[in-house]
Image (cartoon, helix red, strand yellow):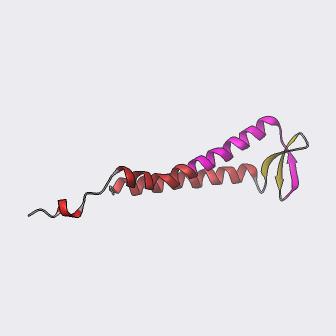
């Protein structure tokens, strides 16, 4: 595979790490949820705090962004491996 594939793969995982840190800092130990018609941050069934609708939507968007970057990073290398097909060894060894 081309050398740039390794660097792009590493860069994508660095972006995943940045999104993970972003979500962890904003959510804290909880995840956004709707309980009893209220927007809350909850952890293990406990409600940590109530959030507004805008905060809830922003936190869910960040969560979705994290999962989409994880998916893109996970499938990047297999996609590039498929895209750049290898040549058979017999074609490479010409006299």
- In the image, residue 92 lies at what x, y percent? 18, 61
- In the image, residue 81 lies at what x, y percent? 38, 55
| Foreground residue among 88 and 7 | 88
Q: Does 73 lie within the magenta span?
A: no
Quarter of the image where the C terminus is located:
bottom left
Q: Main secondary structure of the magenta part?
A: helix
| Foreground residue among 57 and 74 | 74
Label total for image? 0
Which residue is pictured at 74% across the width and 38% down the height? 57
In the image, taking residue 42 as reference, residue 85 lies left or right, namely left
> Residue lying farthest top?
54
> Residue lying farthest right?
36
- In the image, residue 40 lies at what x, y percent? 84, 45
| Foreground residue among 74 and 27 | 74
Report the span colored magenta: 45-69
Which residue is pictured at 81% across the width and 36% down the height? 53
| Foreground residue among 30 and 33 | 33
Quarter of the image where the N terminus is located:
bottom left
Which residue is pictured at 58% across the width and 55% down the height? 17
In the image, taking residue 79 as reference, residue 37 lies left or right, namely right
In the image, taking residue 47 as reference, residue 59 lies left or right, namely left
- In the image, residue 59 lies at what x, y percent? 73, 43
Q: Does 47 lie within the magenta span?
A: yes
């Amino acid at each position: 595979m081309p050398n740039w594939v390794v660097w792009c793969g590493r860069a994508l995982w660095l972006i995943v790490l940045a999104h993970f840190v972003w979500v962890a800092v904003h959510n804290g130990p909880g995840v956004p949820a709707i309980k009893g018609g209220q927007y809350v941050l909850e952890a293990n069934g406990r409600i940590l705090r109530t959030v507004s609708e805008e905060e809830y939507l922003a936190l869910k968007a960040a969560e979705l962004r994290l999962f989409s970057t994880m998916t893109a990073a996970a499938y990047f290398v297999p996609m590039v491996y498929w895209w750049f097909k290898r040549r058979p060894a017999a074609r490479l060894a010409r006299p």
